[in-house]
Image (spheres, grey):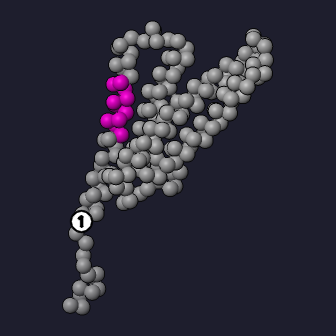
Amino acid sequence: SLLNSPSADHITPRDLPLGSAFAFMGGILTAQSFLLGKCAVELAKASVLLENGNQFQHVGSWVVYGLVGIYGVLTIAAQNEAMRFYDVTVVIPFSFSCFVVFSTANSITFFQQWSTFSLARFSMLGISLAAIIAGVVLVAAPKQIDNAMSNAAAQPLLSPSQASTL
């Protein structure tokens, strides 16, 4: 959770790969639960409108609804682990970028729209994600530099009261 997010004093460079891995998993799981949510809505709509009969007579329909819940819980767990290992200002935008990429690919596949996407659209998606990542680097870098500077600052060996007794 945000309350358990590591402070800048306790983040080490070795925590970045773990935080990034959990953020990546969180982004993928979010995209998959988003796709399964679309499927669940289509199943419910078809059953309510009786387009193809009651869709909930089949086990697969219930599996879709179960997976939505399971993926939701796994998403929360992955995001919490990402924030436990690294700073929120880095892992959440990274996770969101992963979500955008995989959600876009899932949606294009689900709605069978690959032929409508041009190279220019894919290029713009890549440029926008690069802008998000560059923004994260720009926001996170000053915090890490300030933290390094505060840790490197010279500290007095004696308090003023001890120094005055010498």
Residue drawn where x is 44% and y is 32% of the image: 98
Work out whether residue 140 or residue 95 is closer to the camera in this orientation and state it: 95
Q: Residues within 10 Å of mark 1 (few under 14, many from 20)?
A: few
Work out whether residue 31 or residue 155 is closer to the camera in this orientation and state it: 31
Residue drawn where x is 34% and y is 31% of the image: 131
Residue holding disc 1: 153
Residue 138 in sight here: yes
Question: Magenta segment, which residues?
Answer: 126-136
Outermost residue toward the bottom? 165
Residue drawn where x is 27% and y is 53% of the image: 145
Outermost residue toward the left? 166
Outermost residue toward the front? 59
Viewport quadrant of the C terminus = bottom left
Which corner quadrant of the image does residue 35 belong to?
Answer: top right
Which corner quadrant of the image does residue 92 belong to?
Answer: top left
Classify 66 as above or below 1. Answer: above
Q: Secondary structure at mark 1?
A: loop
